[in-house]
C-alpha cells in the first residue's frame, strides 16, 4: 500500500508538472508587500487601446456653419479686397478691366512713345472708342491727347471697318469723372480738337 501511495503521489506531481510545462496559463509571482507587481509573462502581447473620437450627432442644417480658421478668414479678406480694388479700377478706368478692348490697347501702344505710355484703358462699344489716360484734366487738346485720338480713329477705320467712327480721349479720374480731352464725333468731324462753348455775355 505504501508503494501504491508513493506512486500515486509521484503521478500527481508528474501531472502537475505537465500542466505547468505544457499549459498556456502564464506563471504569476506574487509581489512582496510594498513593491510593484511583476509583469505578466508567457501570454500574448496586449495592444494599446485606441482612442475613439466621440461621435456627436451631425445634422444637414449645420452645413456651412463650421467656424472658419483664422487663415481662412484672412484668405477671404484678401479676396474681398482684391474685388474692391478691381471695381475701383473699372470705375475710374485707371487700368485694365473686364471691359477692356485688348486689340485696341495693343494698336494704340504699338509705338513706344509718350502718347502710348499715357493709355490706362481702352473700351469700345458699337463704334464708340473711349481711350482713358493718366493725363490731367488740363491737358485738353494737348499733343498726346490729339495723337491718341488720331490713332483711335485709325483703329476704328482700318482695323474695325467702322463707317461713322466716334473717339473720345479722356483724362484721369477726378471730381468730374474722366473729362474729354480730344474727340472725333463721326465722319463729319474735321479734327480731334475739343471745342468749348463761349461763356454767355
Image (spheres, rainbow, N blue to C red):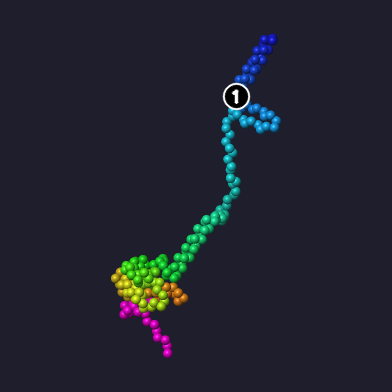
Tell me which corner region of the image, top left, top right, bottom left or bottom right, holds residue 140: bottom left
Tell me if I can see residue 106 in this picture: yes
Residue bearing the label numbered 1: 23
Number of marks drawn:
1
Q: Nearer the viewer, residue 97 or 8?
A: 97
Dividing the picture into quarters, in which one does residue 26 lie? top right
Q: Which residues are magenta?
A: 181-201
- Left or right of residue 154, residue 19 in this image: right
> Residue at (31%, 68%) from the top-left corner?
111
Residue nearest the observer in this picture, 28 or 124? 28
User: Which residue lies at the image location 69% right of the left edge and 9% below the top edge?
Assistant: 1
Q: Which x, y percent locates residue 199?
A: 42, 86
> Who's the residue at 57% across and 32% down the image?
45
x, y percentage for residue 58? 58, 50
- Based on the displayed image, in which of its 4 quarters is residue 172 positioned? bottom left
**Is 1 displayed left or right of 144 in the figure?**
right
- Residue furthest left as drawn: 158
Amino acid at each position: 500500500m505504501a508503494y501504491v501511495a508513493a506512486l500515486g503521489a509521484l503521478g500527481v506531481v508528474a501531472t502537475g508538472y505537465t500542466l505547468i510545462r505544457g499549459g498556456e496559463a502564464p506563471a504569476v509571482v506574487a509581489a512582496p508587500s510594498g513593491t510593484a507587481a511583476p509583469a505578466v509573462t508567457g501570454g500574448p502581447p496586449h495592444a494599446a487601446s485606441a482612442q475613439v473620437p466621440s461621435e456627436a450627432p451631425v445634422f444637414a442644417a449645420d452645413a456651412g456653419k463650421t467656424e472658419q480658421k483664422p487663415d481662412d478668414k484672412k484668405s477671404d479678406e484678401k479676396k474681398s479686397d482684391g474685388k474692391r480694388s478691381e471695381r475701383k479700377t473699372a470705375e475710374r478706368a485707371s487700368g485694365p478691366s473686364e471691359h477692356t478692348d485688348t486689340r485696341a490697347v495693343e494698336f494704340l501702344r504699338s509705338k513706344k512713345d509718350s502718347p502710348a505710355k499715357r493709355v490706362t484703358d481702352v473700351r469700345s462699344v458699337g463704334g464708340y472708342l473711349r481711350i482713358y489716360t493718366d493725363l490731367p484734366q488740363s491737358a485738353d487738346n494737348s499733343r498726346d491727347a490729339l495723337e491718341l485720338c488720331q490713332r483711335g480713329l485709325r483703329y476704328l477705320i482700318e482695323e474695325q471697318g467702322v463707317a461713322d467712327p466716334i473717339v473720345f480721349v479722356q483724362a484721369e479720374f477726378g471730381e468730374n469723372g474722366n473729362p474729354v480731352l480730344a474727340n472725333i464725333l463721326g465722319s463729319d468731324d474735321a479734327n480731334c480738337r475739343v471745342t468749348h462753348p463761349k461763356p454767355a455775355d
